Image (cartoon, rainbow, N blue to C red):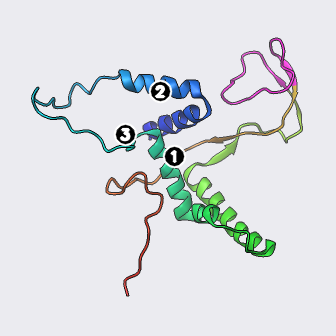
Amino acid sequence: MGNFRTAWSAFWTILKSSTQAEAWKRLQASQSPDATAAKPAPDAPTAKPAPDAPAAGSANEAAVYTLTLLQREARLVDFLQEDISPYSDEQVGAAVRKIHADCRRALDKYFHIEPIRSEPEQSRLDVPEGFDARRLRVTGRSAGQPPFAATLIHRGWVAAKIDLPQRSQARDPQVICPAEVEVQ
């Protein structure tokens, strides 16, 4: 489970920062093969990975797996990929209510989401010196050094515990939901 937590954190860090993405690419390019892996004979051809195939255990696989769970539990991807313009607001609202409840249940089941801050939004608070910038984003007029007097705009969210089901190695890690056919 520790590897998933690291991969999940890396995924979001790399997604949000082009600097971190470039650092990740440099790190991957500089790593040598595992010393315990069997080395091919000097004249033997080496197998090349399939084009565009992410490395096993990568942050991409973790992201797709999260989509897989939200699709399986709440059909979120189906809903987001659907053109909803032909439907009435009442029809969309009814669908959203069920998807919302199912997604919320899935988040609670697998990620145990909790707010980072307990105060209500729009509350006044002090940002102390040495605050954790990974859990608190300071915006507005933050010239100088903390402490800052601030207003809580968003409480933030943290996955207090990640409890994902075991992923089958027989499945393609890029497939969110396989196509389904019915034989007549």
- Pointers 2 and 3 in contact (CB under 8 A)? no
For label 1, count other residues whose C-alpha is less than 10 Å away and answer few (under 14), some (14-19) or many (20+): some
Query: Disc 2 marks which amino acid?
Result: Trp
Q: CA distance from mark 1 to mark 3?
A: 13 Å
Label 2 sits on residue: 24
Q: Quadrant of the N terminus?
A: top left
Pointers 1 and 3 in contact (C-beta within 8 Å): no
The percent coordinates of residue 9 (x first, y second) are 54, 35
Query: Which numbered marker is on residue 55?
Result: 3
Question: How many residues crowd around disc 2 within 10 Å: few (fewer than 14), some, or many (20 or more)?
Answer: some
Q: Is residue 184 left or right of residue 131?
A: left
Q: Of the two numbered discs 2 and 3 on the same chain, state the one appearing first in sequence.
A: 2
Q: Which residue is mark 1?
A: 63
Within-10-Å neighbours for mark 3: few <14, some 14–19, many 20+: few
SS majority, magenta: loop
The residue segment tinted magenta is 126-149
Please tell me which residue lies in front, 161 or 183: 183
Vertical order, 95 against 1 (above or below): below
Q: Which type of secondary structure does the marked residue at label 3 adopt?
A: loop
Residue beneath the point at 63% across and 65% down: 79
Q: Position of residue 110 (x, y in %)?
A: 55, 52
* Three-letter amino acid code at the position of disc 3: Ala
